[in-house]
Amino acid sequence: MSNFMNLIWNEQIKLYAKKGTWVMFAVLLALALGGGLITKFFGTESDFKEYGDDWQTELQAENEELTAEMENDEFAGFVNEMVIAENNYHLENNIKPLPYDGWEYVLENSFLTSVISLFTIIVAAGIISNEFKWDTIKLLLIRPISRSKILLSKYVSVLIFAFTLLVFLLASSWIVGAILFGLNGLNPMVVQDMMPGYVQNDVLGEIVKSYGFGLVTLVMMATFAFMISAIFRSSGMAIGLAIFLMMAGNAIVAFLSQYEWSKYILFANTNLKQYMNGMEPPIPGMSLTFSIIVLAVYFVIFMAAAWAAFTKRDVAGN
Amino acid sequence: MSKPAMQLVNLKKTIGNKPIIKGLDFEIRAGEVFGFLGPNGAGKTTTIRMMVGLIDITEGDVLIEGKSIKTDFKGAIQHVGAIVENPEMYPFLSGWKNLKQYARMVEGVTDERIKEVVSLVGLEKAIHEKAGRYSLGMRQRLGIAQALLHGPSILILDEPTNGLDPSGIREIRKYIRNLAEKENVAVIVSSHLLTEIELMCDRIGVIKNGELIAIEEVKTAENKEGLKEVYIEVEPMETAKAYLDTHLDNEIGVGGKELSMSVKREEIPHILKSLMEQGISIYGVRVLQATLEDKFFDLIGENTIE
Ligand SMILES: Nc1ncnc2c1ncn2[C@@H]1O[C@H](COP(=O)(O)OP(=O)(O)OP(=O)(O)O)[C@@H](O)[C@H]1O
Ligand SMILES: [Mg+2]
C-alpha cells in the first residue's frame, strides 16, 4: 500500500514539475477573478439591490416600473419579463430577496467544470503517452511493480488532479465572490430559474449538485482520454478525440436522436441534470437509472481497454 | 560451478511473421561480466527487452535467480537493474529527482544509498541540474546509477559505453569489473564493438541474426594461439632483415619501414635486444592484439542487416 502511495506521489511530482500544470491553475484563477469583476461592474443592477423591511412594496413598485419601460422600449422585453417573474415568485411565496453574494457566484461558476474537464483531459491524455514519448516507460516498467498497479496509480493521479483543480476553483471563486459581493450568511437560500418556474433551495446543496453533475462528464471524458492514451500511446490523438467528442457530443446526440439506439450514446447520458425537477428525458425510454447503468458500462469498457493495452502489449522501440 | 544468475532457455521472439530471436540458450554466472556482442540489428536489444519483461516472450523462458520473468515477474525483476538502449530520464526533473522516482518504487533505498551511487558514477556536481541539460555521457551515468540503486545481483547494460568519452569508458569498465569481482554481481554488457568490451568481459557471446554463434572465454581466446603480430620500425632495414632471417624461425615480412613477424610475447624483448646489439636503430615497436577481433570478424562475416 505504501508502495501505491509512492507511485501516486511520483506521478504528482512529475505533474507539478511541468509549467503547463501551473498555467492551468493560473487560468482558473484568472477566470474566477475576471468573471467576478465582470459581474460586479456589468451585472444587472436589480441583482445587487438590498431590500428593506418593506420589500413587498419595493418589489411591486419595481414591477410597475419595468412594465412601463416595456411599453416604451420593445428591446427591454425579455430581461424585464424575467425580473418580473422572479419578483412575483418572491411575492407569492413570501420570500424576501437577498442581494447577489459570493455563494451565488460560486454556484454560477459551476460552468467552469467544463474548463476543468478540458485540463483533466489534457493531463489524462499525457500521463501514459508522455512516458512513451520521453521513452522513460522502459525504466518505469522494469521495477518490481505490476503494470496494472502502475496503470491504476496513473489513473488515480488523474482523478486527484481533477479534484485538486475543483477545490482550487471552488476556493478561488468563493474568495473572489466573498470579497466582491459579500456573503449572505453560511448557507443562505437561493432562488433559481429552473425553466419553467422558480425554485428556492439552500445554496450549498445547489453547489454540490451542479458541480457534481459537471463531474460526470469530467470523469467520463478523462477516462476516455486515458484509454486512448494507453491504446495509441499518443497524447495528441487522445486530447483531440476527447475534446472533439466533448464539444460535439450534444450535436451528435441531437443529430441521431431519431434513432432508438441513440440513447445508448455516451453523451446522451452524461448530463444527469436532465432528470432533475421532473423534466422529460430527451429520448423516450431513458431514466436516471438507465443513464447511470449506461455510464457504468462505458466506464468499465474504457478501463478494461486501457488495462488490456497497457498490460499486454510489448514495449519496444519505435 | 555456482548456479547461474540468469538463464536463457530456448528463447525466441517473433514479431509479425518475422523471427527476430531464434532460440537462445546460455547462462550468465554470478560474478562474471558477460559481453553480448553482435552487429547492429543482431537482436541484442530485443533479447534484453525480453530479459526484463518489456516485451513478451514468444517461446522459451528467461530465469533470473531461478525465477521465470514470464510467470513471476516481480520475483525475477527485483534482482535486476538495467539500461535498455539509451537511458532516457525525465528532462524536467533534476538527476537527483529522477533517481528519487526509482528509489520510491522499491523498498529500502535511502538517500544515503542514492548519494553513494551518485558518487560511484561521478555525477555529484551535476546531480541537482535538470536531466534535460545533461550530455549523453551524463545521461548514461545517471542511467547506470538508476540501475544500481537497489543493489541488484544482475546488472544489464545495453551499450553502456555509448556516448562516453575514453576516460568515461575506462571508469565504467573499472566499476563494472569491481561490481563483478567484489560484489559478485552478474553483469551483462551489450555492444557492437569488440574492442570496447573485451577488456571488461570474462566471456563474450556473439549473436548474429538472432542466433548465438559463439561463446568465448576472453582470456583463453587471447592465449590460445599465443602468437602476436609484432611490427618493428628499423634502420637499416636490410641488415635487420638478414639478421632476423638467420636467427629466427619465423617468417619476416617487410612493409614500409617496418618488419613484421608473429612471435610469442616473451620473445619480444629478446629480439629487440639482439637487434640493438647489432647496431640497428629501432624507431618503434607495435604489437597487434587482434586475435579476438579477427575471430569476431571471421564469425560474423560481413555485417549485413537483414
Ligand atoms: N518492433 C519491431 N518490429 C519489427 N521488427 C523489429 C522490432 N524491433 C526490432 N525489430 C528487428 O529486430 C532486429 C533486432 O533488433 P535489435 O534492436 O534487437 O538489434 P540490436 O542488436 O540491439 O542492434 P543495435 O546494435 O543497432 O542496437 C532488427 O532487425 C530489427 O529490425
Ligand atoms: Mg540495440
Image: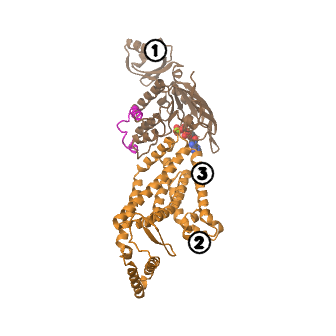
Chain colours: A orange, B brown
Report crowding for label 3: few under 14, some 14 to 19, many 20 or more residues within 10 A (C-alpha).
Answer: few
Please say if B249 is above or below A248.
Answer: above
Disc 2 and disc 3 in contact, CB within 8 angstroms: no
Q: Does mark 3 fall on the same chain as mark 2? A: yes
Rounded to the nearest whole Å, what is the CA distance between mark 1 and mark 3? 70 Å
The percent coordinates of residue A91 (x first, y second) are: 44, 78
| Host chain of mark 2 | A
Left or right position of B134 against B186: left
Q: Secondary structure at mark 1?
A: loop
Q: Is residue B125 magenta?
A: yes
Rounded to the nearest whole Å, what is the CA distance between mark 2 and mark 1? 101 Å
> Does residue B161 show up?
no
| Host chain of mark 3 | A
Which residue carries the number 1 mark?
B266
Report crowding for label 1: few under 14, some 14 to 19, many 20 or more residues within 10 A (C-alpha).
Answer: few
> Does residue B12 show up?
yes
Q: Amino acid at mark 1?
A: Glu
Please say if A263 is above or below B200.
Answer: below
The mark found on residue A304 in the picture is: 3
Q: Does mark 1 fall on the same chain as mark 2? A: no
Q: Nearer the viewer, mark 2 or mark 3?
A: 2
**Nearest to the observer: residue A118 or residue B88:** A118
Q: Amino acid at mark 3?
A: Ala
What's the residue at 44%, 58% (across, down)?
Answer: A166
